[in-house]
Amino acid sequence: MNTKIGTAGNKGEKDRSDCYLSLELKTSGGIQIDLTSKVAALYQDAIKDLCNSVLTHFGIEHALLKVEDKGALPFVMAARLEAAVKQVIKTDLEFLPEMLTENLYVTKKEKLRISRLFLPGNTPSLMINAGIHQPNAIIIDLEDAIAVHKKTEARFLVRNALRSLDFMGSERMVRINQGQMGLEDLDFVIPHNVNLIMLPKCEDATYIHRVNERIEAIQKRSNQSNPVWLMPIIESAMGVMKAMEIAQSAENIVAITIGLEDYTADIGAARTNEGLESFFARSQVLNACKASGIQAIDSVFSDVGDIEGLIENVKHSKSLGFDGMGCLHPRQIRVIHEHFAPNDTELEWAIKVVTSFNDANAKGEGVFSIGTKMIDAPVVKRAQRNIDLAIAMGRLSPDWNSTQQ
């Protein structure tokens, strides 16, 4: 009879902070652990204790476990071993690290989402210190960034990362897979205080309703009530044409983002920095969002080495009315924040408009002028938005608005 062997993890030259292990069940001999690690002299006892704890938790008494360690943290090794265990035995048990109290925060529907840093959900080295870059959100990706044969084991790693890593206040997002696989992904993230779920390749409201039904059922089972926000991703011509339906399909949708790599492939166009091929799609999505009172988030800029191209892209995105965009590399975060924020001229004008409006309002005047330019409510609204954005980004005192009352 052939013995089934469970394997999990990565062992390439660049796979730091990870491990690769194989688990073979035996009928006798107890637990044998064959460990290879550069830090074995310091941590082999701790590593073996952890492995024994996981195996004991799942009721495994006899096995040969081979571990090739490249600096994996305990939550990573535990996730890899659990994934291997569940390849060789059937069990509903979970081995959960303790949840960090720092990660128990919830986020608001109107939260600033100018930058969102994508992280592959099966690459622990990129997750560990992601919070120090201070993006508005961190997206752990279970979809395109994961090879098909690695998607199942990535779920355990993402679950453990949500429980074990300090995200330093960044909104905790997970991009799930499409269809039934995405619904199953929710079982691994919803109970662990994820703030927002990204839904790839949305083309109508039906799947959004299925996602919310699944979230509600999971929260009921786990006795949770924290809000879980949704951000559909529109990535096809059909999705673009149904943007309004998608935007208004659920109360917990806080934003829609557009994925231009897939969209341009769907319409048979090459993506360019000028963006003429995607102008209609971006405008359609943006107007659906604004009409529905939610945020419009632009696509990522995929050339992480072209900072000048990124700057121009951000300026164009801002001029269209988008509220933010995705990041593929930490070096893009500062650039996106800097150029989505109101510049000195915009901020100076906004302060002048809002201050003059408050003075006019105190005199009972609805329309007023600054120099020769007449100012009315829409101009004031736009100026106030820049004030609020400057406060949120630390360029104005949080008390600025109250000082004008």
Image: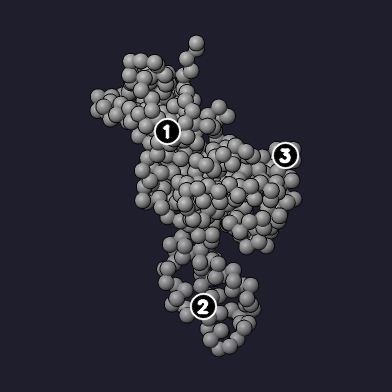
- Determine which residue is flagged by label 3: 266
- Determine which residue is flagged by label 1: 79
Residue shown at the point (29%, 29%) measured from the top left: 49
Badge 1: few (under 14), some or many (20 or more) residues near its Cα, within 10 Å?
many
- Determine which residue is flagged by label 2: 355
Residue 181 rendering spot, x and y as whole percentages:
60, 37
Q: Looking at the picture, does residue 118 appear above or below residue 347? A: above
* Disc 3/disc 1 C-alpha distance (Å): 36 Å
Residue shown at the point (51%, 51%) measured from the top left: 220
Q: Earlier in the sequence, mark 2 or mark 3?
A: 3
Residue shown at the point (51%, 56%) measured from the top left: 227
Here the colouring is one colour
Residue 225 seen in this snapshot: yes
Pair 3/1: label in front: 1
Residue 228 rendering spot, x and y as whole percentages:
53, 53
Q: Earlier in the sequence, mark 3 or mark 1?
A: 1
Residue shown at the point (47%, 62%) measured from the top left: 392
Label 3 secondary element: helix
Report the number of discs: 3
Pair 2/3: label in front: 3
Badge 3: few (under 14), some or many (20 or more) residues near its Cα, within 10 Å?
few
Amino acid identity at mark 1: Ala
* Disc 1/disc 2 C-alpha distance (Å): 55 Å
Residue 41 rendering spot, x and y as whole percentages:
25, 24
